[in-house]
Image (spheres, rainbow, N blue to C red):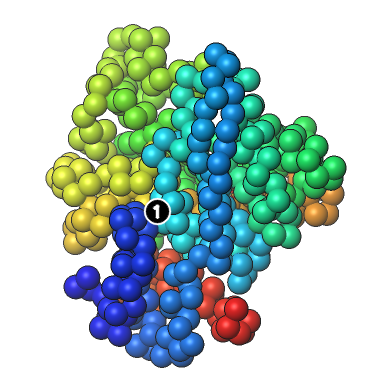
Amino acid sequence: MSHIDEKLQPILSTLLHRNAGEKEFHQALNEVLESVGRVISKHPEYAEEALIERICEPERQIIFRVPWIDDNNEVQINRGFRVQFNSALGPYKGGLRFHPSVNVGIIKFLGFEQTFKNALTGLPIGGGKGGSDFNPRGRSNREIMRFCQSFMMELHRHIGEYIDVPAGDIGVGGREIGYMFGIYKRLTNRYEAGVLTGKGLSYGGSRARTEATGYGNAYFVQRMLGTKGTSFDGKRCVISGSGNVAIYAMEKVLSFGGKVVACSDSDGYVVDDAGIDLELVKQIKEVQRERISEYARLKGSGCHYIKGGSIWDVPCDVALPSATQNELNGGDAKSLVENGVIAIGEGANMPCTPEAVHIFQEAGVLFAPGKAANAGGVATSALEMQQNASRDSWTFEKTEERLAEIMHNIHDACAETAEEYGAPGNYVLGANITGFVRVAEAMRALGIV
Ligand code: GLU
């Protein structure tokens, strides 16, 4: 608590107490409130009318039972969540995560981060997040479908194109969104395309949505490198994860002239000094839905798979953590710094621990926080909503152009705010303050609701 402004200390203590045991949510609250201290010394009006307390309290939290029947005819029970965090800027917007680690604290941290991330996009979307502790690993297509249908059987009454618009996150991709849209359509008897984003192209999805989070992170980091007169060209990159975010970050980094030498999944990582073969990763992860160890088996010589261990031991110039929260700790940050890393771009939500962020900042490493660097996914979701509302479908080029422009704007807004608050180059501060001020302005205008 040492870096928190003293006016905010009692607020934070109450928050930690009221949300006892929710360690990821505590971490996100700490990080945001640390930055907000600087705003309220300059603009005390933002601390009036319990605005800080209101912004940290979700507007609504829904927790529900999800019963479903597996392929062995056994009844399974999971828990479903939707935290509708803030709707000052627009309908609640944010992904659904299906992963056994999911609990209310994780969904709250994600919803809280999402609120500021969405504000940073400059598009009219509030913040929310949801999901389930359902583990999709090893489940058949039919089991996934039955689970998605049961999940939506409850969720449908809480969402809508003007209410709350879910999308994907870990464990939820095009297949799951398709099953959920299908049952939503049947339950409501409405073809309400704008109720979910990340849809397939055949039923109202947007081009470039699949690529958007990874591409967006690469665009952000490219611009950040540009402030130091450099770029991805010729840089050695390590990208953790091998899901949607990691795969399309790799694709854009390659097109910027970078070389990706390692990627991972939750079991281990592969290092390929010749450069990761992106088509092979796509084949393994998107078509076969296999583990990344398959990469080393199929690729053979020149490449190795390390079970367990830390991908951050692999020397690189740029690291893009794109797997999950707290995947990169203080020790990992130290070895990256020792190996000469110059920039980090968070593709996942809060992948670096507070200690790791501190180490990077002390060492003068360029650091792009997730709520700014990975905002390209949700920004393109908002473009999907725009296309749905106008019954239009844009080309890939047009959509990507908008995405690049949005990422550049986010970068520049964060950099300018950091400068204005006396901390040039501090993108964490820049992102937190810019996002906070946009939400706070709207909340002040809307009164105490
Ligand atoms: N799950 C993504 C995120 O963390 C995307 C959310 C969305 O498109 O609504 O931002």
- Answer above or below: position of 107 versus 411: above
Of residues 331 and 341, the one drawn nearer to the viewer in this rendering:
331
Q: Is residue 378 visible?
A: yes
Give coordinates of residue 190: x percent, y percent: 84, 45
Query: Could you tell me the amino acid type at mark 1?
Result: Gly
Q: Is residue 85 above or below residue 299?
A: below
Q: How many marks?
A: 1
Q: Is residue 206 above or below residue 261?
A: below
Query: Residue at left 55%, top 41%?
Result: 65
Report the side of 143 relative to 434 (left or right): right
Question: Mark 1 highlights which residue?
Answer: 105
State left or right for residue 415 relative to residue 244. left
- Which of the pair 228/342 is nearer the observer? 342
Q: Is residue 229 visible?
A: no
Tag 1, which secondary structure? helix
Give the vertical position of 65 relative to 61 (above or below). above
Structural crowding at the residue carrying mark 1, measured as other residues with C-alpha within 10 Å and reported as few (<14), some (14–19) or many (≥20): some
Q: Residue at x 80, y 45 (%)?
A: 188
Locate the N terminus and report the quarter of the image it occupies. Answer: bottom left
Q: Position of residue 20 (x, y in %)?
A: 32, 60
Q: Is mark 1 within 8 Å of ligand 1?
A: no
Judge by depth and name the residue closer to the eye, 349 or 379.
349
* Quarter of the view holding residue 89: bottom right
Instruction: Pick the residue in front: 3 or 216.
Output: 3
Instruction: Give x and y (percent) for residue 131.
Output: 52, 44
In percent of the image, x 25 and y 22: which residue is there?
A: 307
Q: At x 67% / y 54%, what residue is drawn?
A: 158
- Please state, as top left, top right, bottom left or bottom right, where the C terminus lies in the image: bottom right
On the image, the x and y values in percent for residue 306 come to: 25, 22
